[in-house]
Amino acid sequence: MAEFKASNRIERARDLMESFAERTGIRALSQESRERYLWTDAFAVQTFFALSHIYDDEKYRKAAFQLIDLVHENLGKFHPDDERKGWITGLSEEEGKAHPTAGGLRIGKKFPEREKGEIFNEDLEWDRDGQYFHYLTRWIFSLLLAARESGEKKYAFWAAELLKAGNKFIYSSGLGPRMYWKMSTDLSRPLVNGMGGHDPLEGLVCALSIKEEISEEESGIASVSHKFREMCKNKNWSTSDSLGIGGLLLSTLKAAGFPDTKELPPSVRPTRLLQDSINSLKDYVSIKETYEPVERRLAFRECGMSLGLKSYQGNKEKLIALEPTFEQLENYLFLAKEIEDFWLQPDHQEASTWTGHENINAVSLAASLVAGEYPAAFTLI
């Protein structure tokens, strides 16, 4: 397998993002720009900001802000094939632009959401629209990064409004507050039950990150923040899923950046999250999907994990408080290089598992490639 130097990796990341911007009409604001996907675009915003610092090039910073506006204009409104039109919030065009996230944001799937009374079909559901909470959290972090990059508080307020919209995912049960996995576009009804394993954790980390930018009084997130704290109690966050491990690593880093980690619930303190991350990596190595042929691998899932690992690598000097546990994590950094090297191979990018999900694969790989050079874009520290 070919070796790629650090400088070559950054160049490949730049090329991947240039192609993504062209392919999805970001700079030209073309017809393709309407085909937005929230998860992909969240990491694209962060990667563009990272490239703007690495290359000291204003065009990448401009692309990030253009993409934010495109996402709000497209995913803040109903699906083009939905009989409902306009902003999800029901606000006027002018008010909707002022509060584009107040009703949440669509996933960006190919087909509209399942209609009321329509029989659930698991295979079709993957291609149907609605809202995922874990996609909202990704966009919240992109907005908070935009607030820091621009110095404009509006992005932090939009992040707070999006988190408050996510309160609709939470419901009461005999075991305390729980969350739906997928909801309708207008957040009026659940589409898929079953709580995402890390949704409460990401919700709480989002709430605390917002608090770093604007006070709870200003943001109005105190109530939903309390619910996330309740759901996080006594949780074990370990997982063998590569994408889940990547998200857990990023949440750990963000938690490590808070000024007073003693205020966190015991299950959300950085040392505990890091230990759960290491346990997860041990499980992953035991099954190691990277032994599989390219036809059975998904780049965006693997690159989600390598992004988390590379972000740790780039923040190493800031994580003294996490030693000696951090030293254990270094035993798994080789995975990031293996994953990046594999998906940088031109023939692997010709496989159907790459071309069938080209945008999310390309952005995820690019994010991983730049994370070691500029991890602040993905961790806010």
Image (cartoon, grey):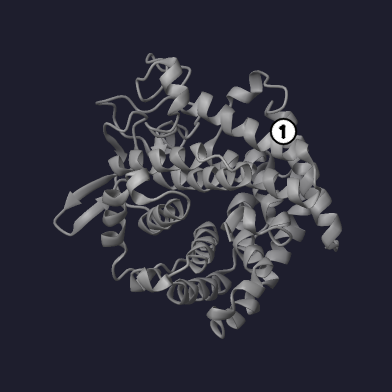
Task: Point out the residue furthest to the left here.
Answer: 174
In the image shown, does 53 or 326 lie closer to the viewer?
53
Quarter-of-image position of residue 167? top left
Q: What residue type is labelled 1?
A: Ala
User: Which residue is denoted by mark 1 in the rendering?
Assistant: 21
Query: Is 374 situated left or right of 232 in this image?
Result: right
Q: Where, by quadrant of the figure, is residue 226 drawn?
A: bottom left
Residue ID at (43%, 29%): 99
Quadrant where the C terminus is found in the figure: bottom right
Question: Does residue 262 appear to the left or right of 21 in the view shown?
Answer: left
- Residue at 40 percent across and 44 percent down: it is 133
Q: Which of 60 and 211 is in front in this view?
A: 211
**Horizontal arrangement in the rendering, residue 123 relative to residue 164 (left or right):** right
Does 224 appear above or below 358? Answer: below
Please tell me which residue lies in front, 306 or 6: 6
> Would you place residue 90 above or below residue 196 in this image?
above
Where's residue 24, x and y in %?
67, 29
Mark yes or no: residue 51 visible: yes
Q: Residue at x 67, y 69 (%)?
A: 313
Residue at screen point 77% across, 39% down:
58
Residue at the extreme bottom:
324
Q: Is residue 78 visible?
A: no
Residue 72 located left or right of residue 266: right
Q: Is mark 1 on a helix, strand or loop?
A: helix
Q: Which percent across, then down, holds residue 1?
A: 83, 63
Q: In this view, does 307 lie above or below 142?
A: below
Expressed as whole percent of the image width and height from the top left, the position of residue 310 reads 66, 64
